[in-house]
Image: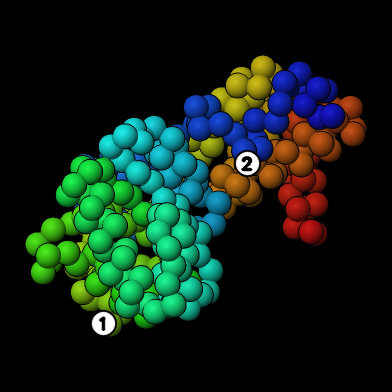
């Protein structure tokens, strides 16, 4: 309803925006540059960001451009699971049979990656999202999973995505060996003010509407209420468009943004 009222063909602040229409922030560009390096140099990469700052979307943009003939990509979003459950999930995602014993699955997984890398010449990238929830046993096993031919080869790349607390977890002494295997890392700083204004204007234009439907002060107000989170910024503006439509407002101003923020905080 609000989209039609403001001349938009769709809601450009929705979470399912196509990667081809992505507005890449500096954080996302930094992450994608490092992922490109990891694509050509197998190893472990760690990326951390606050909730809604765009790390998973950035990963989606990166993976959408990969050539499946030379690079295979597997994404796993983990919660709190046991080590055996982790192995079974990984087996399922890469297309090999899960077994009862962890040791058997370990060997099967390593054989799979060796075959992909050394015989088929296909680089496999495995991404574990929400990695701050991985237990210590899984983190220990990740170090061993990436050890091939007495630690002389890297047969796949591992990407760990998580919230900033993941860095603190990896700094603990038991994870020293895993930490030494990390070849790239990046911590998101959050969307900046100028980027947010550019992002909002770009999104309106993408949907066929004029950026002038939201005044500059309203854009800055929406940004300051977002805490650097693109997800929250999208939610604030979507709510503001609904409120503006309900009150027949031609322009989204600061008052409407504040009303939107208040409604979101009440949920």
Mark 1 neighbour class, 10 Å CA radius: few under 14, some 14 to 19, many 20 or more: few
Find disc 2 in the rendering and name its residue: 15
- Residue 131: x, y in percent? 43, 65
- Residue 236: x, y in percent? 70, 44
- Residue 258: x, y in percent? 75, 46
| Quarter of the rendering occupied by the N terminus | top right
Q: Name the secondary structure under disc 2.
A: loop
Q: Dividing the picture into quarters, in which one does residue 99 lie?
A: bottom left
Residue extending farthest right: 247
Find disc 1 in the rendering and name its residue: 173
Q: Name the secondary structure under disc 1.
A: helix
- Which residue sits at x=77%, y=34%? 241
- The circle on residue 41 is none
- Which residue sits at x=79%, y=59%? 267
Q: From the viewer's perspective, is 119 left or right of 65?
A: left
Q: Dividing the picture into quarters, in which one does residue 199 lie?
A: top right
In the rendered image, the vertical position of residue 6 relative to residue 44, given as above or below: above
In the rendered image, the vertical position of residue 197 relative to residue 119, given as above or below: above
């Amino acid at each position: 309803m609000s989209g039609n009222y403001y001349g938009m063909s769709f809601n450009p602040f929705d979470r399912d925006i196509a990667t081809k229409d992505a507005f890449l922030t500096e954080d996302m560009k930094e992450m994608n540059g490092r992922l490109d390096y990891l694509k050509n140099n197998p190893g472990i990469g760690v990326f951390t960001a606050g909730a809604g700052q765009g790390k998973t979307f950035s990963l989606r943009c990166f993976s959408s451009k990969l050539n499946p003939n030379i690079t295979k990509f597997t994404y796993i979003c983990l919660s709190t699971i046991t080590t055996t459950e982790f192995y079974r999930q990984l087996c399922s995602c890469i297309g090999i049979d899960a077994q009862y014993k962890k040791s058997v699955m370990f060997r099967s997984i390593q054989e799979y990656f060796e075959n992909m890398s050394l015989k088929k010449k296909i680089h496999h990238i495995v991404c574990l999202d929400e990695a701050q929830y991985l237990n210590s046993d899984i983190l220990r096993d990740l170090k061993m999973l990436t050890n091939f031919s007495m630690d002389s080869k890297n047969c796949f790349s591992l990407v760990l995505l998580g919230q900033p607390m993941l860095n603190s977890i990896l700094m603990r002494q038991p994870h020293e060996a895993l930490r030494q295997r990390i070849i790239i890392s990046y911590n998101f700083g959050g969307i900046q003010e100028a980027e947010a204004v550019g992002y909002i204007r770009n999104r309106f234009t993408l949907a066929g509407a004029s950026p002038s439907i939201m005044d500059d002060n309203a854009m800055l107000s929406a940004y300051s209420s977002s805490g650097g989170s693109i997800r929250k910024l999208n939610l604030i503006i979507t709510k503001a468009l609904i409120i503006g439509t309900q009150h027949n407002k031609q322009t989204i101003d600061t008052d409407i943004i504040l009303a939107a923020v208040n409604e979101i905080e009440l949920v």
